[in-house]
Amino acid sequence: MTNMFARSIASLALAAIALPALAQNAAPQAPASPFSAENMSVNEMVGDWSVRCFRVASIAPCDVMQLATQEGTNRRVMLVSIAYVPSEKNFAMQIVVPLGVVLAQGLTLGTGAAALSNVKFTRCERDGCYVESALPMATVDGLSAATGMTSISLVAYPSNEAVNLPVSLNGFKDAIAKMRAEANARATAPAAPQ
């Protein structure tokens, strides 16, 4: 899967968009994030998806995640995270892609008849551009029924060239089922309106 990402990302000219190198000076260590690996109560691979649950009080304490890195550098190329919110009986997604995309075009998550088209970016930071939104049950069902690969389609800037980033669906159905069961068991009730 990594080689497919390397070929797709060549279109985005990642070499020219490289993030600045982080300083290697010793600095005081910040406290661990509640979402860091040491704060996970579940961290298990199901096919090509990680099922993760965190030791935090949350209405959505678990997610499934797929991370693609650039071969040879371990630099993140794409991250797809899907969480389940039991109190709403709904899914939420976060997708992170590299900088250098046409923001107005959004991205498309291909799932056949249940494809999400032109989903708008919510923000860009130095590590990439983010899509954060609800994920319709029809799309989750479409991804669960599909096999092999799907893709995230976007448009590179400034070339206006279409780019397809492959997403493996190996294990997706089982990973979603496991994560949903874990989320149902661990989620806290939403805060009452004030």
Image (spheres, rainbow, N blue to C red):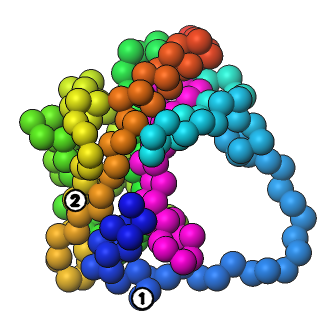
Location of residue 97 with respect to 167 vertically, above or below:
below
Magenta residue span:
60-84
Question: What is the magenta segment's predominant secondary structure?
Answer: strand
* Image mark for residue 65: none
Location of residue 147 with respect to 31 vertically, above or below:
above
Is 139 part of what is drawn in magenta? no
Image location of residue 107, percent across then percent down = 24, 55
Secondary structure at badge 1 equals helix
* Residue in the picture at 79% in, 48% down: 32
For marks 1 and 2 on the same chain, the one whose residue lies earlier in the sequence: 1
Image location of residue 30, percent across then percent down = 83, 56
> In this rendering, would 67 be left or right of 191?
left
Location of residue 80 with respect to 82 vertically, above or below:
below
Quarter of image, res 23? bottom right
Residue to which mark 2 is pinned: 153
* Residue in the picture at 62% in, 16% down: 186
* Residue in the picture at 37% in, 21% down: 90
In front here: 77 or 89?
Answer: 77
In front here: 160 or 163?
Answer: 163
Count numbered badges in the picture: 2
> In this rendering, would 56 be left or right of 146?
right
Image location of residue 129, percent across then percent down = 41, 61
* Residue placed furthest toward the left: 113
Residue to which mark 1 is pinned: 16
* Residue in the picture at 22% in, 36% down: 146
In front here: 159 or 168?
Answer: 168
Give the quadrant of the N terminus: bottom left
Real-space Cα separation, disc 1 to disc 2, in angstroms: 20 Å
